[in-house]
Image (tube, rainbow, N blue to C red):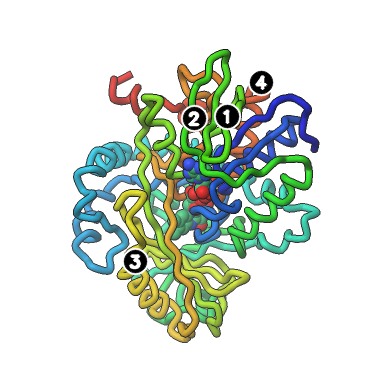
Amino acid sequence: MAGGEHEPVVVIGAGAVGICCALSLLEAGEHVLLIDRDDPGGGASSGNAGIISPWSVSPMSVPGLWRNIPRWLLKPAGPLVVAPSYALKVAPWIVKFLKQGSVNRARKISDSLATLNHSNVELYRRHLAGTGAEHLIVDSYYVHAYRQANKASLQALEYQLRVEKGGDLDVIGTSELTKLEPALSSEFKAAVLIKGQARARSPGEICQILAQKFAAHGGEIVKELVSAIVPHGDGMWRIETPAKSIMASRVVLAAGAWSAQLLEPLGLSVPLEAERGYHVEFSNPGVTLNHSVMDVDLKCVASSMTTGLRVAGTSEFAGLDKPANAKRIAILTRQAQRILPDLNTTQVEQWMGVRPSTPDSLPFLGQVPGQKGLFAAFGHSHYGLMMAPRTGGLIADIMTGRQPNIDLDPYRFDRFQLEDRGA
Ligand SMILES: Cc1cc2nc3c(=O)[nH]c(=O)nc-3n(C[C@H](O)[C@H](O)[C@H](O)COP(=O)(O)OP(=O)(O)OC[C@H]3O[C@@H](n4cnc5c(N)ncnc54)[C@H](O)[C@@H]3O)c2cc1C
């Protein structure tokens, strides 16, 4: 792996997606400059639930979901929050989101999620090999825990999709669940086990280690806020920061939920929402989990990290800039205690981050139409940690003229415009 001599490819955003793009471009022989206003891995990529699964192939918008929305919104501790001041702003996105919720669409989207999640565990292990941080990815089941045993059924579409893609799933009852995860509350009466996946024991540290690897192999990291991406003529782009302007003919926009803001001055608009999520992490928890565990009723995920026991969840629509909502932290803390009755909650760290969410849960990938040299790599919604390594490989293929052997249409930048026009 070595940076080429020619002018750099600039990657904007050093979250999991930007870092993986930068690493794959470097491996392909490019000179790469990775720019972020913060240290690498400081955005959504640090505080997530750490699930890395080839079998996360169910979109967020599924048939029948709309029926739950009023109940979730009305319950103060429900998993969905729309800030009243933001309701009108987010309404068009929600309409687009709900439009994706047919069985046919879910099946199609599932294929495209599977493509980006293919071999994700192996790809992370390959990136981490030789860094000394291989232990940060461990094999895991995904335990979907249910309070009502009859609800743990593989007939549900989200499980059927996984089975159809080759996932190994099982349903277990109380005694097996207790053996698997002794710390879980006895409220849980059954679980669906999704096997053959992994969990990150510190998603933020993985990003930092991979950024260090990138730098050690000749990649350049610049800590600056990008204020604008401006076409400069002669096929060049000027990336403006408070300190300097950087010129490049090829730019990858991987700024997560902030990507749409940087495109607006170019007259480009995409349905990208800031879907805010939270975590609480208990540094002296007194209990451990062996796997990633989702409380299906409360819609949050618990996992043991290197730094403590983390419980993550919540979908809050309130825009990019609103401060974190302290009520959601209190709710997650109570939920964590309900999931793990012996949890010691005395030392708790709290976090809010922003998922870059699209109506169909798929990212925008590839050349931005009409903007030669500008490439999109954002919008990974609920699955950005796990889809990052394949995204990086695909972006490097596209930018270095190696035609990827997959259909890129589902990730097109203009797919929603085409849908609106009925094309
Ligand atoms: C609670 C929660 C749980 C989740 N659980 C999982 C999970 O288990 N598994 C999974 O795969 N995904 C999960 N996700 C989703 C996942 O975290 C995101 O999809 C992913 O982190 C997005 O990565 P990214 O690199 O696109 O964005 P980010 O990680 O947000 O990175 C974007 C970067 O761009 C930088 N940036 C933005 N604007 C500018 C600018 N103008 N100038 C310079 N830099 C800029 C930011 O500083 C940031 O570092 C979860 C998310 C949340 C909130």
**Residue of label 3:** 297
Q: Image point 40% across, 58% down: which residue?
A: 277
Q: Quadrant of the N terminus?
A: top right
**Which badge, 1 or 3, is on the more N-terminal residue?**
1
**Mark 3 neighbour class, 10 Å CA radius: few under 14, some 14 to 19, many 20 or more:** few
Tell me residue 349's x, y (percent).
48, 73
Q: Is residue 176 visible?
A: yes
Left or right of 23? Residue 406 is: left
Which one is earlier in the sequence, the residue at label 4 or at label 3?
3
Which is more N-terminal, label 1 or label 2? 2
- On the rendered structure, is 307 left or right of 175? right
**Tag nearer the camera, 1 or 4:** 1
Q: Earlier in the sequence, mark 3 or mark 2?
A: 2
Q: Quadrant of residue 286?
A: bottom right
Q: List x then y, in percent, for residue 185.
A: 43, 80
**Amino acid beneath label 3:** Asp
State if disc 3 and disc 4 touch (CB < 8 Å): no
Tag in front: 4 or 3: 4
Question: Which residue occupies 50% across, 41% down?
Answer: 113
Residue linked to disc 4:
401
Gap in Å between the C-alphas at discs 1 and 4? 15 Å
- Whether pointer 1 and pointer 3 mark residues with C-beta atoms closer than 8 Å, the reply is no
Q: Earlier in the sequence, mark 1 or mark 4?
A: 1
Rendered view: 304 above or below 27: below
**Distance from Cα at disc 4 to Cα at disc 2:** 23 Å
Q: Which mark is residue 251?
A: 1
Q: Label 2, on which residue?
A: 229
